[in-house]
Image: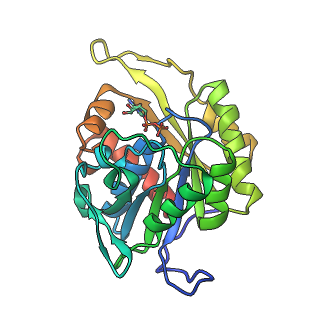
């Protein structure tokens, strides 16, 4: 199944909101937020009117990744007006609403309402919203996916066995509610030593590709473990917005997602 950016679809409520492209993972720390941010940037560079929602409301990291930390969305007619991150991408995150350093500890229904406000906002001419989901495959994720019905999902995993088992659960969750799986991405795949340029595989290699094939889902590509990716991400400068190898990798991924 490939994901075609569409103008917009009309949900049951009658209000027109952009299509949602979910980025999910079976567990945390595998690079889901990094992928969501860079995928959004690469899609924008490919000409898609893309927006970004940080649905990881318990641990929002998109404001930092997208260089919009400290920005505050305004509200108009009871709806939020997104702020703008790198390359002008409209975005919303709980990180823009919560006080810095304040722990967010909501129960399911409240979390759902908060997410509803982030999705049902003034998105203007945005046609496609990349949604950074919370990691995991529990009830919160299931409820979110059921309620917001993404048009497609990209699953990210490291090549490790345990991470892959979790990725399979994430795929099962989307399949359960009939959300098409666009494909799998393998992150932290191969480490290029900055000193000797030798490639090593701290988390193994090829695991996500094998899993994708055995589950009959497309494999979208691999992202290497690089110091630069981590440094640029922490600095709020997603490498997909620049030039070079990493930018090309994300451009190729975006090309497969929107083919
Ligand atoms: P998740 O959203 O799955 O919890 P993150 O995207 O926050 O994961 O990534 C976790 C950490 O790993 C971050 O510090 C991020 O910068 C780093 N990271 C992610 N992918 C890579 C990579 N390919 N190379 C180097 N560091 C990475």
Q: Nearer the viewer, residue 32 or 94?
A: 94
Quadrant in which ligand 1 is drawn: top left
> Can you say which quadrant of the picture contains the N terminus?
bottom right
Q: Is residue 161 left or right of residue 187?
A: right
Q: Is 202 placed above or below 110 here?
A: above
Identify which residue is drawn at 59% across, 49% down: 107
Q: Is residue 14 above or below residue 36?
A: below
The residue shown at (48%, 44%) is 58
The answer to whether residue 259 of the structure is visible from this angle is no
Image spot of residue 119 (x, y percent): 47, 67
The x, y position of residue 190, in whole percent, is 46, 25
Q: Is residue 163 left or right of residue 18?
A: right
Observer-nearest residue: 106 or 134? 106
Q: Residue at x 36, y 48 (%)?
A: 62
Q: Where residue 250 sits in the image (x, y, percent)?
A: 39, 48
Q: Is residue 128 visible?
A: yes
As drawn, which residue projects farthest toward the bottom?
14
Residue drawn at 56 percent across, 65 percent down: 3
Q: Nearer the viewer, residue 202 or 71?
A: 71
């Amino acid at each position: 199944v490939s994901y075609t950016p569409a103008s917009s679809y009309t949900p049951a409520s009658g209000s027109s909101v952009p299509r949602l492209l979910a980025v999910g993972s079976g567990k945390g720390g595998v690079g889901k937020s990094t992928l969501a941010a860079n995928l959004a940037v690469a899609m924008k560079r490919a000409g898609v009117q893309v927006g970004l929602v940080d649905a990881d409301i318990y641990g929002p990291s998109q404001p930092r990744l997208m260089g919009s930390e400290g920005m505050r969305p305004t509200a108009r007619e009871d709806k939020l007006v997104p702020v703008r991150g790198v390359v002008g991408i409209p975005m919303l995150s709980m990180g823009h609403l919560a006080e810095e350093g304040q722990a967010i500890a909501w129960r399911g229904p409240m979390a759902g309402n908060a997410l509803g406000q982030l999705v049902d906002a003034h998105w203007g001419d945005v046609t496609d919203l990349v949604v950074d989901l919370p990691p995991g495959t529990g009830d919160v994720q299931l409820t979110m996916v059921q309620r917001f019905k993404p048009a497609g999902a990209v699953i990210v995993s490291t090549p490790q066995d345990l991470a892959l088992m979790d990725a399979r659960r994430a795929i099962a969750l989307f399949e359960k509610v009939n959300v098409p799986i666009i494909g799998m991405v393998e992150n932290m795949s191969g480490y290029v030593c900055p000193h000797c340029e030798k490639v090593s595989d701290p988390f193994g290699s090829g695991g996500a590709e094998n899993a994708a094939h055995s589950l009959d889902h497309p494999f979208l590509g691999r992202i290497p473990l690089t110091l630069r990716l981590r440094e640029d991400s922490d600095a709020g400068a997603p490498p997909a917005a620049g030039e070079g190898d990493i930018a090309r990798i994300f451009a190729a991924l975006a090309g497969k997602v929107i083919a």
